[in-house]
């Protein structure tokens, strides 16, 4: 549980850094605003997608059922 | 965010231009393509306008150019593109031609036209001559053959009578005047020779037979040479014929019938000698004609070759001239007809460029008076103009296909650049498919320049090419979502080590018995007998999950029997989360519109209740989803979120024990009751205050004097002395004001409120398509792998074919078909679910007068 929280924190920071880098280091020029919007949105979309996937597996309600045959070595 | 966020600010510019400089001014502006001219004489028909003559001249020149093109096509001379023409010839296409050049062009065209037509008539005449002579020579030949044949035939019959029968002159039929064939009567046997289209021969023969009661004898022979009719330029198969008859009366009849069948009759001498001489003459004349014809054709080819070089640039120049005069026709002519008055929409950022163009035009036209420019204050709604580049244009097209943004409205396109490919990728998530898609888009981008010139691709290719940057982003996002779904062509990869401890199992085969040995759940099974073998299905326990897979889906699920049972709730919940985020984002974007257009009322009476409504119901649902994920639930105790949400309304104030998610006694019930009350209060909040305040404001407005309405035509740009009599903005195309009828306001608000409240529910449900499409895509690619690719394992030859089938189906079905379907669903989510939260889309596009667009438009036709 705690470990999960730390992973979430780390990934959130990573995505924040990625989005922030895009935001602050966007090239100067007429398209700067556009690049900034794009990087923030990209970081958010990727973050929430990862977050949903990660959190849905943190406390699984069901466990996998595996066919013995599928994992058997000869 | 620059011009992508809102459209460019526009000014309505009035220009008062001296008549002699007007052409040049419009030309310069057309080169830049920055001004959209307004039609100032909408009530004047096209034929009554001032420059109608010039437009007509342009039409005439265009007609001539088309004639030249036709001639070129006939002569099969290719027309080179403008870029391929040597610069000193095509140079004049770089800038618009001056009126003098127009006169020169017109003169040149008339000359060329005359010359070409002359050559053509000459050629036609020569061709006709040629045809006649050829036909005559054929007739002569077949006449000779016929008489020769008749003579030999005769010779066979009376071999004794004519020992020297080879001599043509001695033949009986050989000379038609020898009537003696027919016995004692010396009746003159005459004949008529001519040429006739081959298919008419049978009818001709029958008619002749009937008309002469069998007293005429027809001989015909097909002409093997292709005879081309010079008027229609088609090959007509012909036959030559000889008709024999007796007497002048029959001759007249035969001639008439032949004429009726449009046969050409040629004078054919009666004696063989004369025919021989004529034959020589005809051959001589044919030879002469041939050489003259060759020279004529060469001459025409030379003329056309020079035309071919210039014709592209000519047609561009005429387009430009015509465009200029069309624009000039929209101008108002001053009473003294010394100057023209024009009005144009110009983006503010281009105003300096426009002034530059005007001063250049004054210089070029050597006009003494510079044009006078004002910026008019107006109530007209300006057109919408976004400054785009090749990357953003595709995304703007997606938005414009739904509706062009109203002037200065928040533009959804810059956000769609990311959210559109992202939502697409949620439905299309597969690393392999995303990679292929990105690769294809990369190829389109890498060979962008040669491909842009490629015109034969058709509409489908153009669509893909125009959307190459969209496809690239879609591919890249699909790579990411594919990694998260852990789908690579439907296979999974264990990058970080699964969080589930899967027992290692060994297959044991003893005689007929197959069992599995291994340690499961703390017990060792040796797999030797029924009792000691591992069960067929291994039920893992949620408690054995040692850690959560760090990035994406745990690969153990790829081989789990209950994979979908696990994936479906996850994808469904994620769809709702993404949907609520995007809808909330849309509502927040609405605030930028409200503040920009100073609609404070809308913030208080629309934005705030809308956000509260959405958050209290679906925001709460999202929170519950995360809460449920973050906590551990013994299997049977987990509450169903959907039922909790429904019961929040149905069992208001109470809570079922199985719905309890968190909190001590009743805390959840209390919170949920509060949320429901807030959400329900939002409905009258949206419904009532706004129409009430609007109606009250209108009433007050109606009592106030109307003096602040006539600010039209007020000149801002200084130089007030310029043209006081110029009527500025006509009331005819005033924009429709927002309705002030109280009934309409109330109805409008009712619809708006109901639409929003129901929309929140149906739109959230609509986002579930993210789950459905992604499920369908994953299942389809898995089925393809299992059914096609899997069949080839174990046999190299079979594998090759299986791989071929699998690769083909992957591209055709999964990439193209599934891609299109995911594209359409992403499109819908943006147009309906996202944009209806803030986007009006009632603007009209800025169409500047631009030569570039004119010339491009020509290609599209």
Image: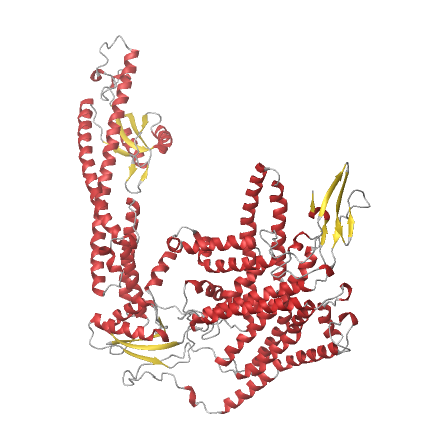
Q: In the image, residue B132 lies at what x, y percent?
A: 24, 35
Residue B571 vertical position relative to residue B8 in the rendered view, above or below: above
Q: Residue at x 47, y 53 (%)?
A: B440
Q: Check the image and name the residue furthest to the right.
A: B531
Quadrant of the snapshot with the C terminus of chain B: bottom left
Asked if residue A29 lies left or right of residue B828, the reply is left
Q: In the image, residue B776 lies at what x, y percent?
A: 62, 55
Q: Nearer the viewer, residue B747 or B613?
A: B613
Q: In the image, residue B471 lies at what x, y percent?
A: 49, 58
Residue A53 vertical position relative to residue B331 in the rendered view, above or below: above
Residue B208 vertical position relative to residue B80 in the rendered view, above or below: above
Please indicate, yes or no, whether residue B403 appears anywhere in the rendered image: no
Please indicate, yes or no, whether residue A44 appears anywhere in the rendered image: yes
How many dots with numbers?
A: 0
Asked if residue B208 lies left or right of residue B615, the reply is left
Q: Nearer the viewer, residue B572 or B526?
A: B526
Q: Nearer the viewer, residue B824 or B243?
A: B824
Residue B343 vertical position relative to residue B265 in the rendered view, above or below: below
Q: Check the image and name the residue furthest to the bottom.
A: B704
Q: Nearer the viewer, residue B176 or B326?
A: B326
What colour scheme has been applied to the protein in the rendered image? Answer: secondary structure
Quadrant of the snapshot with the N terminus of chain B: bottom left
Q: Check the image and name the residue furthest to the top.
A: B160
Q: In the image, residue B812 lies at what x, y percent?
A: 54, 49
């Amino acid at each position: 549980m705690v470990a999960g929280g730390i992973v979430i924190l780390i990934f959130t920071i990573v995505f924040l850094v990625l989005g922030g880098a895009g935001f602050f280091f966007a090239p100067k020029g007429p398209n700067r605003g556009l690049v900034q919007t794009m990087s923030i949105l990209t970081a958010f979309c990727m973050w929430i997608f990862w977050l949903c996937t990660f959190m849905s597996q943190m406390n699984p309600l069901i466990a996998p059922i595996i066919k013995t045959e599928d994992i058997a070595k000869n | 965010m620059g011009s992508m966020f809102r459209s460019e600010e526009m000014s309505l510019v009035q220009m008062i231009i001296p008549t002699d400089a007007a052409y040049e001014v419009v030309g310069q502006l057309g080169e830049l393509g920055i001004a959209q001219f307004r039609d100032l004489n909408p009530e004047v028909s096209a034929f009554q306008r001032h420059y109608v003559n010039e437009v007509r001249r342009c039409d005439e020149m265009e007609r001539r150019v088309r004639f030249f093109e036709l001639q070129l096509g006939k002569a099969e001379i290719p027309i080179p593109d403008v870029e391929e023409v040597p610069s000193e010839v095509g140079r004049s296409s770089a800038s618009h031609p001056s009126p003098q050049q127009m006169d020169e062009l017109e003169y040149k065209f008339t000359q060329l036209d005359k010359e070409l037509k002359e050559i053509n008539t000459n050629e036609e005449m020569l061709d006709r001559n040629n045809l006649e002579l050829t036909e005559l020579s054929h007739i002569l030949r077949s006449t000779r053959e016929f008489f020769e044949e008749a003579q030999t035939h005769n010779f066979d019959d009376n071999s004794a009578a004519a020992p020297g029968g080879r001599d043509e002159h001695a033949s009986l039929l050989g000379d038609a005047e020898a009537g003696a064939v027919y016995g004692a009567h010396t009746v003159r046997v005459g004949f008529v020779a001519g040429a006739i289209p081959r298919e008419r021969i049978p009818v001709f023969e029958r008619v002749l037979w009937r008309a002469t009661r069998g007293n005429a004898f027809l001989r015909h022979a097909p002409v093997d040479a292709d005879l081309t009719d010079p008027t229609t330029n088609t090959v007509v198969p012909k036959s030559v014929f000889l008709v024999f008859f007796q007497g002048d009366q029959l001759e007249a009849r035969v001639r008439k019938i032949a004429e009726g069948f449009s046969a050409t009759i040629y004078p054919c001498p009666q004696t063989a000698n004369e025919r021989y001489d004529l034959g020589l003459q005809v051959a001589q004349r044919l030879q002469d004609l041939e050489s003259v014809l060759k020279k004529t054709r060469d001459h025409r080819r030379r003329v056309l070759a020079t035309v071919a070089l210039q014709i592209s640039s000519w047609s561009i120049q005429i387009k430009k001239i015509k465009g200029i005069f069309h624009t000039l026709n929209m101008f108002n002519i001053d009473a003294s007809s010394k100057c023209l008055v024009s009005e144009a929409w110009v983006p503010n950022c281009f105003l300096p460029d426009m002034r530059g163009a005007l001063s250049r035009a004054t210089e070029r036209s050597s006009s003494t008076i510079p044009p006078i420019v004002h910026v008019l204050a107006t109530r007209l709604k300006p057109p919408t103009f976004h400054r785009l580049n090749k990357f953003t244009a595709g995304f703007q097209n997606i938005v414009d296909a739904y509706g062009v943004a109203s002037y200065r409205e928040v533009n959804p396109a810059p956000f769609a650049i990311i959210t559109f490919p992202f939502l697409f990728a949620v439905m299309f998530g597969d690393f392999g498919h995303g990679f292929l898609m990105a690769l294809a888009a990369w190829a389109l981008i890498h060979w962008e320049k040669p491909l842009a010139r490629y015109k034969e691709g058709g509409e489908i290719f153009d669509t893909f090419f125009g959307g190459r940057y969209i496809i690239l982003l879609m591919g890249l996002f699909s790579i990411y979502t594919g990694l998260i779904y852990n789908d690579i062509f439907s296979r999974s990869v264990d990058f970080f080590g699964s969080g589930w401890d899967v027992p290692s199992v060994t297959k044991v085969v003893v005689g007929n018995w197959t069992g599995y040995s291994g340690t499961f759940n703390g017990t060792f099974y040796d797999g030797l007998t029924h009792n000691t073998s591992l069960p067929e299905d291994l039920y893992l326990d949620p408690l054995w999950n040692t850690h959560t897979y760090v990035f994406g889906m745990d690969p153990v699920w790829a081989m789990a029997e209950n994979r979908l049972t696990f994936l479906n709730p996850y994808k469904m919940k994620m769809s709702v989360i993404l949907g609520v985020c995007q809808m909330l984002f849309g509502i927040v974007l609405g605030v930028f519109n409200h503040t920009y257009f100073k609609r404070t009322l809308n913030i208080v009476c629309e934005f705030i209740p809308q956000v509260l409504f959405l958050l209290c119901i679906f925001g709460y649902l999202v929170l519950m989803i995360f809460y449920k994920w973050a906590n551990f639930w013994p299997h049977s105790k987990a509450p169903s979120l959907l039922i909790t949400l429904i019961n929040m309304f149905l069992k208001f104030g109470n809570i079922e024990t199985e719905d309890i998610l968190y909190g001590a006694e009743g805390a959840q019930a209390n919170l949920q009751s509060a949320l429901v009350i807030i959400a329900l209060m939002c409905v009258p909040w949206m419904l009532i205050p706004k129409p009430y305040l609007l109606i009250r404001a209108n009433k007050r407005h109606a009592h106030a004097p109307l003096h602040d309405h006539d600010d039209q035509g007020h000149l801002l740009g200084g130089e007030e002395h310029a043209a006081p009599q110029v009527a500025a903005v006509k009331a005819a195309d005033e924009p429709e004001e927002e309705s002030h009828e109280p009934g309409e306001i109330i109805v409008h608000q009712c619809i708006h409120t109901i639409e929003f409240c129901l929309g929140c529910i149906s739109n959230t449900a609509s986002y579930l398509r993210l789950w459905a499409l992604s499920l369908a895509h994953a299942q389809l690619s898995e089925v393809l792998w299992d059914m096609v690719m899997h069949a080839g394992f174990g046999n190299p030859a079979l594998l090759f074919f299986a791989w071929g089938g699998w690769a083909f189906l992957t591209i055709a079905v999964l990439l193209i078909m599934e891609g299109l379907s995911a594209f359409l669903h992403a499109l819908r989510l943006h147009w309906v679910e996202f944009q209806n939260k803030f986007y009006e889309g009632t603007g009209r596009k800025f169409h500047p007068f631009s030569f570039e667009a004119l010339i491009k438009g020509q290609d599209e036709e």
